[in-house]
Amino acid sequence: STRRSMLLVGGGVLAISIAAFFRVPLLPMIGIDLGMSATQLGLVTTGFAVGRLVIDIPAGRLTNRVQPVPLLAAAAFVLAVGSALFASARFPLWVIGASFVIGVASALTNATGMTFFSLSTTVERRGIALAAFSSALLGGQAVGPLVGGAIADVGGWRQAQAAAAISGLVVCIALLWAGGAPGRWARAGGDGDPGAFHPAGQPVPRSERIALRGVSFAMFFTLGAMPQTLVPVIGAQEFGLSATMIGAALGLGGFCRFVGGLFGGFVSDRVARRAALLPGLVLQAIGVGLIATTSAGGWLAAIVLMSLASWGISVGATVIADRAAPSDVGGLLGTYRFVGDLGLIAGPLATALLYERVGKPAAVLLVAGLLLATALACAVMVPETRWSTSGGRRGAVDGDSAGGDTRPT
């Protein structure tokens, strides 16, 4: 059934994401052990992003040809290989290369989950479906550091990554064993209309495409720069926190991502896509700004607010899926993630360099300014795309219709 398939795919995304993010709170320990600077540690996250980048678009195309469960099983196996390489690393370039392999596994996981959840429900519930996917993904990204940090404090960072490798193998076997009902790559209950504000085949303005891809770039720039790089480095260097404490803080952020993601999906479906997207970007910028404070309390508050407001990436994907015919969704979301992973490459490099050479305020200003500029671009260039239901007829919220009732809700 579709529900069983969603549970299986969502569970696979969660489990792979947990193991893939064991590495985040380990960065300070790795830096000490292998003599790596903050900039070199930023390259570890960049290596992960490059791995995602090279597979994003091919993976998006694969999702229209291969069932989701075998794709997730393949991602889990690649994760196991990358984590084993990471655990055995002896010099910085080895760590960066292992992170690249883990990034490949992450991209395949994201492509599978995002496309499946985009097409497995009706357009009126697409926002909450993608929020559920995002919650599984981001929840894993938060639980992973918590577990990885706890293992590292007991046995060291190599043992934590070895545990991630074993987890990947277990998930791969479990998915192959349970994968008898992989689900349909089609929108349940659909009538052939993709539910786009513009009918399928009608071009979307270039400015709008740029603004939506800018959401992906800005959100992943922030993710790579802050939670995955500077947050653990600042926690260790400025506040003397252990890997367990840093992992616990990021774990709290994961719970906040779960709550915020579902809230953003609810607002996206029940109110409007823009009503979720724009405030999320602004709140994210405020959360980044709190990193500039000089107290551990401000550092923790920044993690909480950035995590609560992290629904922008799923809402942007929802708008793209609103525009597309079902057969095009995988490829378009592949491009969306590709642009995001460019941000994941640039974010750690730019902000770690600024932090090291200029200081924390400059790094914070860069990230917060990018988020606010993206919010402004979306406010100007991205129209509303949420369909409403009125009298059994579907229409667009702001009256520019593709047919049917256009009364606002």
Image (cartoon, rainbow, N blue to C red):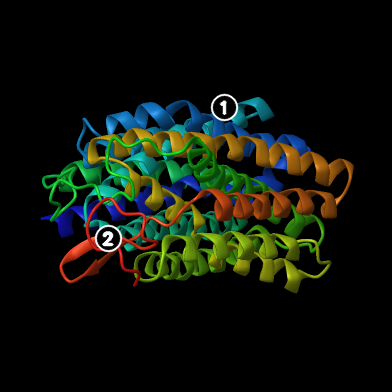
**Is the N terminus in the top left, top right, bottom left or bottom right quadrant?**
bottom left
Identified at 23% across, 67% down, the residue is 389
182 displayed left or right of 169: left
Spot occupied by residue 34 in the image (x, y as percentages of width and height): 72, 35
Residue 205, compared with residue 114, is above or below; it is above
From the image, tell me which residue sits under label 2: 395
Residue 357: give its label.
Answer: none
121 displayed left or right of 47: left
289 displayed left or right of 173: right
Q: Nearer the viewer, residue 383 or 359?
A: 383
Give amino acid for label 1: Gly
Badge 1 element:
helix
**How dense is the environment of label 2, judged by Cα within 10 Å: few (below 14), some, or many (20 and up)?**
many
**How dense is the environment of label 1, judged by Cα within 10 Å: few (below 14), some, or many (20 and up)?**
many
Spot occupied by residue 90 in the image (x, y as percentages of width and height): 64, 29
Which mark is first along the chain, 2 or 1? Answer: 1
Spot occupied by residue 60 in the image (x, y as percentages of width and height): 34, 33
Spot occupied by residue 217 in the image (x, y as percentages of width and height): 57, 42
Give amino acid for label 2: Gly
229 displayed left or right of 280: right
Q: CA distance from mark 1 to mark 2?
A: 49 Å
Find out whether the residues at labels 1 and 2 contact each other: C-beta distance under 8 Å. Answer: no
From the image, tell me which residue sits under label 1: 97
Residue 220, compared with residue 36, is above or below; it is below
Identified at 30% across, 57% down, the residue is 126
**Is the C terminus in the top left, top right, bottom left or bottom right quadrant?**
bottom left
Residue 113, compared with residue 98, is above or below; it is below
Q: Nearer the viewer, residue 371 or 11?
A: 371
